[in-house]
Image (cartoon, helix red, strand yellow):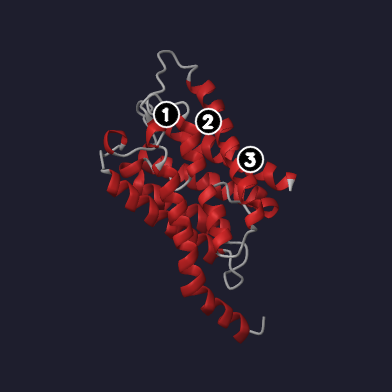
């Protein structure tokens, strides 16, 4: 169990440090900024690389909503849920802390939003609470469908992390203007501690919506897709 938690710690550390780091350090760098598309790709790459690196140890969740969804789908033990959540939040916060130390080394540094999530005045596009809620629930549900489907026994072996990383990239391309993209309570919590915009006051949404979306995606798979998967396995003699 300790190795699983260590893998989740380091995987979530890498996700926050790499993904949020791209936003804080490189997104708007003069003349060379990577922009929204670059940040979206960075988040996808963090999950893809760590899924290959430590996914075989812990399952490569790096996200409380993913852990909950997999438990709902019957792919993960409920007894391990809370320990995974703790490892993910602590790992993410450690990643944000290291990022803060680096970022604050620049003259005139101001933390500002520090890649945090938000709605209303804290949304990059000033989207409403309802818009943020619907966006986060929908995208997290879709993310779980990709995760569960791409790691199913009927899916091509070895390509799961690639599909998951690309899905997270797509999710960011869609929702950075809306919420600055959460779909991950650990990622949201980690940077909110360092933001100077009141992000902590809106953090509740970025737990509620991703967890609800993760459970929804798992239920869709379990009751609408899983029976077909089982039927396919039976037909193929597995």
Is residue 219 or residue 135 the one in the foreground? 219
Residue 77: percent from the left, percent from the top? 65, 58
Q: Which of the two discs, 2 and 1, labels the residue nearer the N terminus? A: 2
| Label pair 2/1, CB-CB below 8 angstroms | yes
Q: Which of the two discs, 1 and 3, labels the residue nearer the N terminus? A: 3
Crowd band around label 2 with a 10 angstrom C-alpha radius: few (<14), some (14–19), many (20+): many
Alpha-carbon span between mark 3 and mark 2: 13 Å
Residue 85 lies in what quarter of the image? top right
From where the camera sits, is residue 145 visible?
Answer: no
Alpha-carbon span between mark 2 and mark 1: 9 Å
Residue 123 lies in what quarter of the image? top left
Disc ID at residue 146: none
Identified at 70% across, 52% down, the residue is: 57
- Judging by the rendered image, the residue that carries numbered circle 3 is 9
- Judging by the rendered image, the residue that carries numbered circle 2 is 96
- Judging by the rendered image, the residue that carries numbered circle 1 is 114
Alpha-carbon span between mark 1 and mark 3: 21 Å
């Amino acid at each position: 169990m300790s190795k699983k938690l260590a893998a989740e710690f380091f995987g979530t550390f890498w996700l926050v440090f790499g993904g949020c780091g791209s936003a804080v350090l490189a997104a708007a760098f003069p003349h060379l900024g990577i922009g929204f598309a670059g940040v979206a790709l960075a988040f996808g790459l963090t999950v893809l690389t760590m899924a290959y690196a430590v996914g075989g140890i812990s399952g490569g969740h790096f996200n409380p909503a993913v852990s909950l969804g997999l438990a709902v789908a019957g792919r993960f033990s409920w007894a391990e849920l809370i320990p995974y959540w703790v490892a993910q939040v602590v790992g993410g916060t450690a990643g944000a802390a290291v990022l803060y130390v680096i970022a604050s080394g620049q003259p005139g540094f101001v933390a500002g939003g520090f890649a945090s999530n938000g709605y209303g005045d804290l949304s990059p596009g000033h989207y409403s609470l309802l818009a943020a809620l619907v966006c986060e629930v929908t995208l997290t549900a879709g993310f779980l469908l990709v995760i569960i489907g791409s790691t199913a026994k009927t899916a091509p072996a070895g390509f799961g992390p690639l599909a998951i990383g690309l899905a997270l990239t797509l999710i960011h391309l869609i929702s950075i203007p809306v919420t600055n993209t959460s779909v991950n309570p650990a990622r949201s919590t980690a940077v909110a501690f360092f933001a100077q915009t009141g992000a902590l006051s809106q953090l509740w949404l970025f737990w509620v919506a991703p967890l609800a979306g993760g459970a929804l995606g798992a239920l869709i798979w379990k009751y609408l897709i899983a029976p077909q998967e089982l039927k396919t396995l039976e037909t193929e003699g597995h």
